[in-house]
Amino acid sequence: MGYIPHHALENLKKYSYKGVDKSLVSRYVLQPFWAWLVTLWPTWVAPNTITLTGLCLVLGNFATLIYYDPKFLTEKEGADGPPNWIYFTWAAGLFLYQSLDAIDGKQARRTGMAGPLGEMFDHGCDALNTTLEVILCARALNLGRSWWTVASQVATLANFYLTTWEEYHTGQLFLGIFSGPVEGILSIVLVYAITGFTGPQFWDQDFLAFTRLDRYPIVLEYIPPLGLNDAFMVLGGVVLAFNIITSYINVYKARVASDQGPFLPLLLLLPFPISVAIEIFWLSSPSFKESHILNSALFLPFLCSWGLQFAHQVSRIILAHVTKQPFPYWDAMWLWSIVGAIDANLPTLINRPPLIQNTMPRTALFVYVTLAVTFLSYARFCTLVINDITEYLGIACFTVRKKDKAGDWVSASEVNGKKQ
């Protein structure tokens, strides 16, 4: 048809969502709330419309950051930054995003619209939200233009990639006792709320002094001085390490149970570190400490283009999962970043000035063109995939409609009623 091969489209009808959520917070607190929240939505509202509404709230949060701090500076760098009340809107927006993201599946079952299209759309929105929240949280933690923000981007995207990689190999979405979509988001909501009360400078306090652990010599001997924001990043690294182990254990068990080699999937983790290496190589020009992009207003569009490339990468993995296609280990968008990385580092590689990024205005132009190209590439991917799936399965994306036997779009309730 269009983007998806016909033989792969046929596999869409075999797809059924499977998920495991071991979160105690989700089970005993959030699930009852979500079960009530979904009843507030009329059944003529499509599940994907609910998901998109949540993403629009996050985009609204991001727009306020651009308005108040377009250069992505911090208070310690002389920026005024967003007023404290803005952080409360970020907390509310993210919590509502989580809630709407959680009830879209319930709405799909209420309206008879459940299927692989919702899975694709949900993951695509989640992938976009991941980078947006990295940027917003870095601002709330007063990290701004720093390698800590880059580390946060890498760790957060790694968690998402791991979950997607695991779902591809096990056939189900596994959320552990502490997962990004539940506890991870609630932690960031808490960060926004605390920042709203105290201001971003609160997070620059020394971790050991704040926790009174500096009274113990043995602690001072083994733990270096860290700000509260730095300690938050270290905690994120610990969670990432735990999730890596948990994800591989789940994949190992699934592969062994199906009499498949348990170690081959490890090779399919490589695309993520390769893509990260490309972005960091580009970002570290002309040197790690004197990055032209990181230490300028270009850092924000650079992170956004990186996030869009990542969303394209993981969305293709989910598409391969629901259509039972081979794992996509290569992404064409890497070529653009490779060109940018090599060009920026020509002085280091062959002792010649960059051909494209030889001045800051030209670097800015290239970064913004990169952002535009990645946006258009991902938008094209989403449009083609949505069109292919809606036409083949006869299920609308943003309205509660399905195709009847005559091929006409009618209310989903009519088609569902005839099937029963």
Image (cartoon, grey):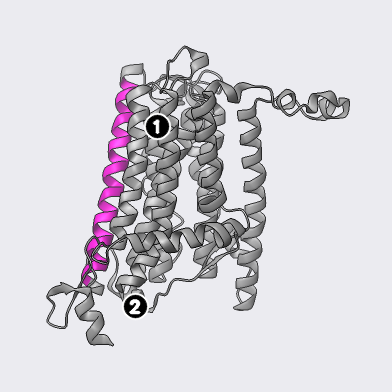
Q: Residue at x 87, y 25 (%)?
A: 217
The answer to whether residue 276 is above or below residue 27 is: above
What kind of secondary structure does the magenta stretch mostly adopt? helix
Circle 2 sits on which residue?
A: 13
Q: Give the residues drawn in magenta, as a range.
A: 362-391
Q: At label 1, which amino acid type do we have?
A: Phe
Give SS at disc 2: helix
Q: Quadrant of the C terminus?
A: bottom left
Q: Secondary structure at mark 1?
A: helix
Magenta includes 364? Answer: yes
Coordinates of residue 184 in the picture (x, y in percent): 55, 47
The part of the image, by quadrant, that contains residue 298 is top left
Tally of numbered discs: 2
Instruction: State the mark number for residue 302.
Output: 1
Q: Residue furthest top?
A: 78
Q: Nearer the viewer, mark 1 or mark 2?
A: 2
